[in-house]
Structure formats: structure tokens, C-alpha cells
Amino acid sequence: YYENVFDAIQYVEHDKKDKTIIHKIHGDGGDGHEVIPFIKPVKAVGNIEDWLTTILNTMRLTLKYHARSCAAGVFEARSDPSNKLRPLVDSNIAQFALLAIQIMWTYETQTALEQCKTNANAMYSNALKQKKMCSKR
């Protein structure tokens, strides 16, 4: 019944020993769906409204944690994107892998735009760099 309450969640994973403890959320998508472990377990006891609110707040905190971790990974990957971008993408779920790529692209493009005052080829160089990163497998 979680899919009726929360968008894009198929089900949650309960502890095998204590069924009141929820550890992970499973997204929609059938085979190969994304599984996101909570940053802290949620105890489903008491009024349903209360623990559903706790699930919602824990989901928000978990996603915020992953977004922050992703942004930190982009900072590290900037030093050597040709070697560090792939591990960053592979270590995140699809939504955050895409966020990492978007953050990196925005940073690189903004930097190139700022350099246009002193370097006429800044945007061209940036376009070549982006093309190289996109074509790398």
C-alpha cells in the first residue's frame, strides 16, 4: 500500500526479525528497480500517520544526504574527470548519477563563460572537453 501513499515507491523493506523496522525503499521500475537504504531505520509503531510522516522525513533526509554526497563526489571528480567520473556515476543511483553529471557540466560551462573575457576559445575548449567526456565509455 506504500505505492498509494508515496509516488514512485513500490514497497519498503522490513527487518527480517522485527517487522516494525523499515530499512530500505524500493522504487518503481520492475526488474532492476532502484533500492535506497535509509540513513537510519524507521520504526513503524503507533499511529500510522505518525510513522508514515517519519518515513517521509527520513526519505527526505536520505535523499538530501545522497545529494550532498554526490556534490562532494563531483568536487573530487573535477580534478580528473576522465578517470573519476565513471566511478562517481557507478556508485550512485541513476537520479543522483545524473545530478552529478549536471553539476559537473554546469561548473565547467560556467567556468568557461567566465574565462571568455580573457580567452576567446574557452567555450570551444569546453565543448570539446564535454564531447570527450560524453563519448567515453
Image (cartoon, rainbow, N blue to C red):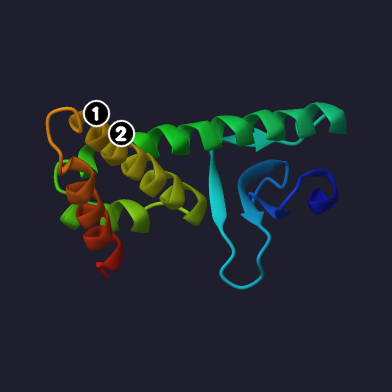
Q: Which is more toward the observer, 44 or 26? A: 26
Q: Is residue 66 left or right of residue 57?
A: left
Task: Mark yes or no: residue 32 visible.
Answer: yes
In the depicted structure, whether residue 135 falls above or below residue 53: below
Residue shown at 23% from the left, 37% from the top: 112
Residue shown at 56% from the left, 69% from the top: 32
* Amino acid on which disc 2 is placed: Gln
The x, y position of residue 24, in whole percent, is: 60, 48
In contact (CB < 8 Å): disc 2 and disc 1:
yes
Q: Which mark is residue 124?
A: none
In the depicted structure, whether residue 54 falls above or below residue 108: above
Q: Which is more toward the observer, 75 or 31? A: 75
The x, y position of residue 97, in whole percent, is: 42, 51
Q: CA distance from mark 2 to mark 1?
A: 6 Å
Query: Which residue is identified by label 1?
Result: 114
In the depicted structure, whether residue 37 falls above or below residue 72: below
The quadrant holding residue 121 is top left
Q: Is residue 137 left or right of residue 70?
A: left
Q: Which is more toward the observer, 85 or 62? A: 85
The x, y position of residue 78, in whole percent, is: 21, 41
Residue shown at 30% from the left, 40% from the top: 109
The quadrant holding residue 45 is top right
Q: Residue furthest bottom?
A: 31
Query: Which residue is identified by label 2?
Result: 110
Task: Mark yes or no: residue 16 visible.
Answer: no
Query: Callout 1 environment at 10 Å: few (<14), some (14 to 19), or many (20+)?
Result: few
* Amino acid on which disc 1 is placed: Glu
Instruction: Give the secondary structure at mark 1.
Output: helix
